[in-house]
Image (spheres, rainbow, N blue to C red):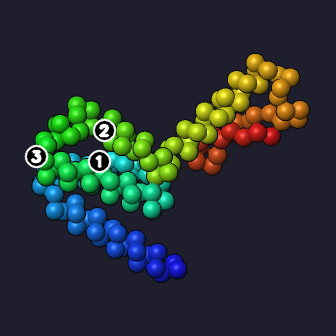
Amino acid sequence: MVLRKLIGDKKRWRAYKARKDALPDTHRDVLDAVEHYIYFFASSETDALMSLLEDLTDLFEQAAADGTEIADLVGTDPIEFAEGFLRNYPEASWIHREHKRLTTAVDKAIAAEHHPTDARDDHHLTTSRGAAGHFRCRTV
């Protein structure tokens, strides 16, 4: 099963690269830049990341076929374009998990401040720094 998954992923990656290479230069250059940007936020979940990249390629292929210019495709803010696309694939982004973790910790702390009698008896929220210096929140 592992071998089949690796071979399947490799075939899927090669098909994606071939589709990207077939794009006009301007569309391919922008797709390369968006792909590079997305990698900074992407998780290691291969299926989710490949789905994102394939859908992004679909968009660029359709734009190229329709003669849509890059400015009309991406808009005036390429960062918002890339991040907006990434928001549609939360399972492909590690940052989504961290956003959720942060908002949950803050929500719990706010609830505990406003409703101390509703808080769990012997539990409280603690924060600490991990080995990499990142804050971690946990309920103790």
Which residue in the structure is indicated by mark 2?
81
Tell me the residue at 20%/54% (across/down).
Answer: 61
CB-based contact (under 8 Å), mark 2 and mark 1:
yes
Quadrant for the C terminus in the image? top right
CB-based contact (under 8 Å), mark 3 and mark 2:
no
Q: Is residue 43 left or right of residue 27?
A: right
* Circle nearer the N terminus (2, 1): 1
Mark nearest the camera among 3 and 2 is 3
Dot 2 crowding, Cα within 10 Å, few <14, some 14–19, many 20+: some
Q: Amino acid at mark 2?
A: Phe
Residue 70, label in figure: none
**Which corner quadrant of the image does residue 10 belong to?**
bottom left
User: Gap between marks 1 and 3, in whole Å?
Assistant: 19 Å
Where is residue 47 drawn, in percent x and y? Answer: 45, 62
* Circle nearer the N terminus (3, 2): 3
Is 113 located above or below residue 104 in the figure?
A: above
Is 131 located above or below residue 71 in the figure?
A: below
Tell me the residue at 26%/54% (across/down).
Answer: 58
Residue 34, label in figure: 1
Which residue in the structure is indicated by mark 3?
67
- The kind of secondary structure element at disc 3 is loop
* Circle nearer the N terminus (1, 3): 1
Is 113 located above or below residue 50 in the figure?
A: above
Where is residue 91 drawn, in percent x and y? Answer: 50, 51
- The kind of secondary structure element at disc 2 is helix
Q: Amino acid at mark 3?
A: Gly
User: Gap between marks 3 and 2, in whole Å?
Assistant: 19 Å
Total number of numbered discs in the rendering? 3
Q: Amino acid at mark 1?
A: Val
Specify whether residue 34 is in view. Answer: yes
